[in-house]
Image (cartoon, rainbow, N blue to C red):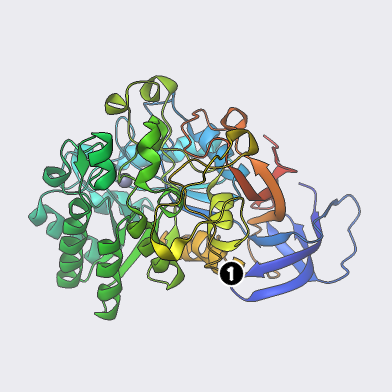
Amino acid sequence: MADVLLRGGRVIDSNGERRADVLVAGSKVQAVAEGLSAPTGALVLDVGGCIVSPGLVDLHCHLREPGQEESECVETGTRSAALGGYTAVVAMPNTDPPVDSGSMVRDLAELGRSSLVEMAVAGAITVGRNGSRLAPMAEMASLGVKIFTDDGAGVQDSALMRNAMEYAAGIGVTIAEHAEDASLAAGGQMHEGSWSSRLGLPGSAAVAEEVMVARDLALARLTGARLHLMHLSTAGSIALVRQARMDGIQVTAEVTPHHLSLTDGALASYDPNLKMSPPLRSAEDVNAVRAGVAQSVVDAIATDHAPHPLEAKEVPFADAANGVIGLETALAVALTVLVSGSGPFIADVASGEDACVEGASAALGAPPDGAVGASGLLGIQELLALMSWKPARIACLDHSQGGPVVPGSQANICVVDLDAAWVVDPDRFASRSRNTPFRGWKLFGKVLHTICNGEPVVLDGEPQR
Ligand SMILES: [Zn+2]
């Protein structure tokens, strides 16, 4: 593997920002300083003006292998991740069959050989993810599993969840929850509110999420378990986590790019690519989630990359599958709506009104009605914290991921051109699926290069394998 010299970039990591060249040799960062000379045979990349950051870490993606390879597989999903600037992902266990045993963890590790980036495997909390009996968590933990979740559904049985948390606390792993009370959410097609009434679609109320968030926080307090709340989407959930932090409960929380950038008003299009669980929420909820991000109540932005084949989405809204893909757009969406402050569409976020872009033309790359505009809420370093080093810590990947770009560190790096604008064209995705809610959006920030364990897996926006 040739050495790689990144010349002239702005290095931003948990230590701060400095202008420096970065020399990668083997799988490690060898030198970080201004004016480094290139060793013979090194690949020299001019990254003047670009951000050089620790690679991104996604806490929540669905790679669909084994069992649903028509949607995605480890190879295509992790290629998609690398193109998005990720050097590590946590694969959800709701495959077919699910990852609920030691032998399945071993099978996934085997599939991980085709991964372009580091792939951590999450294990199921219950056998078959059916919510009735605990899976052999200790066996899976002994094989390196750090996060357990029945994602796709919440654990409905409170006593079982208590047992899971007691067990998890004992073996030092994290319980991650898809917080949704199934009885309250039953039949819901979108967020319950004024838009669901207007559109005539059955709603799923915010309390379906909040009831389970409150229960899990109470159980985490009781058991001392580490709880990670996935894809939080409501103002009430954010308030509960804010209070739990003050009460000393061990909780972390993630939100998704789509819940930060779209409201339920977007559903006026009845586009099945806007259907997901939890659903897009009200503008008030979006503002509260954004405030949670800005005020460090939220620890991570995760994609919930959920690929589906066309036939699962090109159907009437009521019949469409839940979920959107996100690995190739997450960073740019977050940069555009949270950081740039000068994105392609500006809305009065503080007012809590639905943000509608009148007369917007898809041809100009403008987002649809229901999109919420740029806010300038975060600095670039704060955003990278949410997408790299904080999730690395939650996933216990911080020995190799998210660390400062210093000599001797593992060379997991992404290079981003903040000024590059681009229009989302799903037909160009490496993902096997096309179900993005951001088709046609003009976004700022393009991943140029991704280096994974010293290997350039993406160069100039092109995958190298
Ligand atoms: Zn989920």
Residue 323 visible? The answer is no
> Which of the pair 159/385 is nearer the observer?
385
> Which of the pair 275/78 is nearer the observer?
275
Residue 194 visible? The answer is yes
Question: How packed is label 1: few (under 14 Cα within 10 Å), some, or many (20 or more)?
Answer: few
Look at the numbered disc 1 and say if its residue's Cβ is closer than 8 Å to ligand 1: no
In the displayed structure, would residue 262 be above or below residue 289?
Answer: above
**Circle 1: residue type:** Gly
Query: Residue at position x 29%, y 71% from top?
Result: 250
In the image: residue 454, left or right of residue 127? right
In the image: residue 326, left or right of residue 154? right
The quadrant of the picture occupied by the C terminus is top right
Query: Residue at position x 71%, y 63% from top?
Result: 29
The location of residue 437, given as percent across then percent down, is: 47, 38
In the displayed structure, would residue 418 be above or below residue 200?
Answer: below
Q: Quadrant of residue 187?
A: top left
Q: Quadrant of residue 320?
A: top left
Count of all numbered marks drawn on residues in the image: 1
In the image: residue 434, left or right of residue 354? right
Q: Residue furthest front?
A: 359
Query: Residue at position x 42%, y 73% from top?
Result: 295
In the picture of the structure, the residue carrying the numbered disc 1 is 379
The location of residue 443, given as percent across then percent down, is: 61, 47
Query: Circle 1 — which element?
Result: loop
The location of residue 439, given as percent across then percent down, is: 54, 35
The location of residue 73, given as percent across then percent down, is: 47, 31
